[in-house]
Image (cartoon, rainbow, N blue to C red):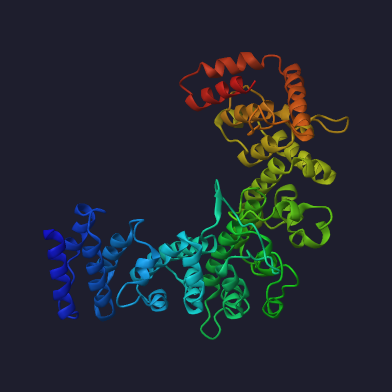
Amino acid sequence: MDLIADIRSHISEVASDPAGKALDPRLLEKFDGQVTESITETNRDALIHQLAELLPTLQQDPTPATSLIEILVRPASYTFAHVLDIDPHVDFTAGLKALFPSINLVTLSLLEKAKLKSSDAGIVAGKPEVVAALIELWLSTPNTAVSSKAHTVLLGLLTAGERYQGATTTIPSQDRYGLPAQSLMWRRVFRDKDIYESIFRICSLTNAGHNGELSKRDKTVAQARLLDLLVKIDCESIRRPQIPEVESRYGVKDGGLMEFAALKMVDYEDDVLMHMTLIDFFTDLLKPDHSVVETGDFASYQLSSRNHQEHNLGGTHSRTLSYYLDSAKHSSLDSTYLYGRSANYLATYCSHYPAHFVSSQSVVESTITRLLEVLNKMTPGQWAQGSTPKHDLHVLASLPRQALLPTPTSPSPLFLLSAKPPNEDALQTLATIFQGPKNEHSPIDHTPSDTESQQASAARSLYWLYLDQYPALWQHVIQAAETVALKDTALAAIALIHAI
């Protein structure tokens, strides 16, 4: 093809004068638009060979060249075996440590090919200097695109070749450290002392700004990146000690990397933004499908009565709830930024662990009291203007239905919602509550649990009690549904009709 010949000729010219002859981005960009996977393997390998020889000598922005390499290796038919055959051989460590983000990105694209086979990931794991450079780049780079790509590559290598069930990776067996028995990459990351310690060192605030370490600001970025990965690879290996000699230096007792990240790493009292990130992390841990590694349920472990005192993430469950349930005892800054996060944590907790929530009587009472306080302050004018307490309505809609039933000592906050004046958020909340628990199972093979049956029964009771208090409910709902000028409110009213 003439285009390939032109590109090869141009690369040869630049290689003969890497300091004086500039790459032609327009010419190289034509490749993406005009050449597809139809390029022959011979031409592809020849181009990659030329570019691989050019990059070490190039004295200009390498982005046009690295972009072309990424295009050339993008097809699935280009495997990690092809990457290893590139001549001259790819220096992964140098590429990951390079100052140019474009060099980092193309190196990561080549490494990513190894995630498709566990044997290829094992080859990468056999290169400790490469794994160390990958982790350093992922946590330390100021370039978000590079960090995101490094995160994807590291996650892919850790789960390489495993059996997928939907979005979940099943790791069938573990060694005595709780690591996947057949995964060399897991053992490299969690059992190599230098690599394992580098994660603690980069993310710890104790050495911020000392001896070439990251500044406190950059370390908080690294902390957020670590939390993001831990949610996805949550399993036994990150909840138990791996190298006590390393962990003890950072105050970790027996909870491994998870204890460090959740309890020791973040200065939540002095950094409200990282505190927000930490609460989001705890919220994600409560979701049953939060991890791609299916080796246990951290939330059940976290909330179980047997481990409640020692392993309830150091009391973070109660602390996190307090920013919503008892916001007055916190500073105005914390209340402003953490109230909504705490409410979302509570809503997630109620949605996924209703039985545990109902068994925590003090939490139930505090939640109902909080909702009554907020909703009692609402005026008809605020409902009409759409100034709704969205976080509180989210909590209300997520509560187990039996917790909303009125008692001799406490009315139900549900009865403080009215269909008039019509309000989109109020109508959606009523629809969610009256509909009862979501049944995501097949009706053929699913027998409702006791908790689901109780919630369904309570939802029916709430509906009739509400209708008794607001006998004109349907008159107002139908009127709202027919008011097409208020589209969102009309749709919410229709949703309520459908839910009933």
Q: Which residue lies furthest to the right in this view?
A: 408
Q: Where is residue 419 in the image (x, y as percent from the top left)?
A: 63, 22
Q: Is residue 260 above or below residue 324?
A: below
Q: Look at 65% across and 50% down and name the residue there.
A: 339
Q: Which residue lies furthest to the bottom in this view?
A: 211
Q: Position of residue 215 (x, y in %)?
A: 53, 76
Q: Quadrant of residue 158?
A: bottom right
Q: Quadrant of the N terminus?
A: bottom left
Q: In which quarter of the image is residue 254?
A: bottom right
Task: Pick whichever, 74 or 412, lies toward us.
Answer: 74
Task: Pick whichever, 197 or 208, lies toward us.
Answer: 197
Q: Count the numbered circles shown.
A: 0
Q: In the picture provided, is 364 more to the left or to the right than 154?
A: right
Whether residue 341 is visible to the viewer of this picture, yes or no, is yes
Task: Pick whichever, 417 or 42, lies toward us.
Answer: 42
Q: Is residue 60 above or below residue 300?
A: below
Q: Position of residue 179 (x, y in %)?
A: 65, 66
Q: Position of residue 129 (x, y in %)?
A: 48, 79
Q: Look at 54% across and 80% down and name the residue there.
A: 209
Whether residue 106 is visible to the viewer of this picture, yes or no, is no
Q: Quadrant of the C terminus?
A: top right
Q: In this view, does 420 lie above or below 184?
A: above
